[in-house]
Image (cartoon, rainbow, N blue to C red):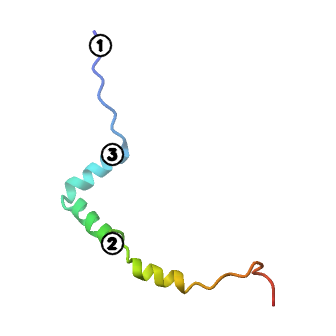
Amino acid sequence: MPLAVKPYVSEATRFLQSLRVQDPELEAKQKQGRALLWDKQPDFELRQAFDAAKVPQKPYVYGTE
């Protein structure tokens, strides 16, 4: 007869679960914050302008001339 073993739940998992219980809108706030900084469409025209404006670097950058 096998012994019943409780599944292990780490302290970090318990902490995150308690956060979700305390603030049910936490995940929505996280997604809103991510969208503010990261979820943006690239501007290819602006990227091309940046690439066109680059100045080539000299082979030896530590020279005084």
Nearer-N-terminus badge (1/2):
1
Task: Identify the element where label 1 is drawn.
Answer: loop
Nearer-N-terminus badge (3/1):
1
Tell me the mark number nearer the camera, choosing from 2 and 3. Answer: 2
Residue situated in front as seen by the camera: 57 or 21? 57
For the point 32% across and 68% down, the residue is: 39
The residue indicated by pointer 2 is 40
**61 w.r.t. 14: above or below:** below
How far across and down, in percent of the image, does residue 10 sit? Answer: 36, 41
Amino acid, disc 2? Lys
The residue indicated by pointer 3 is 13
How far across and down, in percent of the image, does residue 17 sit? Answer: 26, 49
**How far, Cα to Cα, is label 1 from label 2?**
53 Å
For the point 62% across and 85% down, the residue is: 55
**How far, Cα to Cα, is label 2 from label 3?**
31 Å
Task: Identify the element where label 3 is drawn.
Answer: helix
Residue situated in front as seen by the camera: 44 or 38? 44
Tell me the mark number nearer the camera, choosing from 1 and 2. Answer: 2
Disc 2 crowd rating (10 Å Cα; few below 14, some 14-19, many 20+) is few
**63 w.r.t. 26: above or below:** below
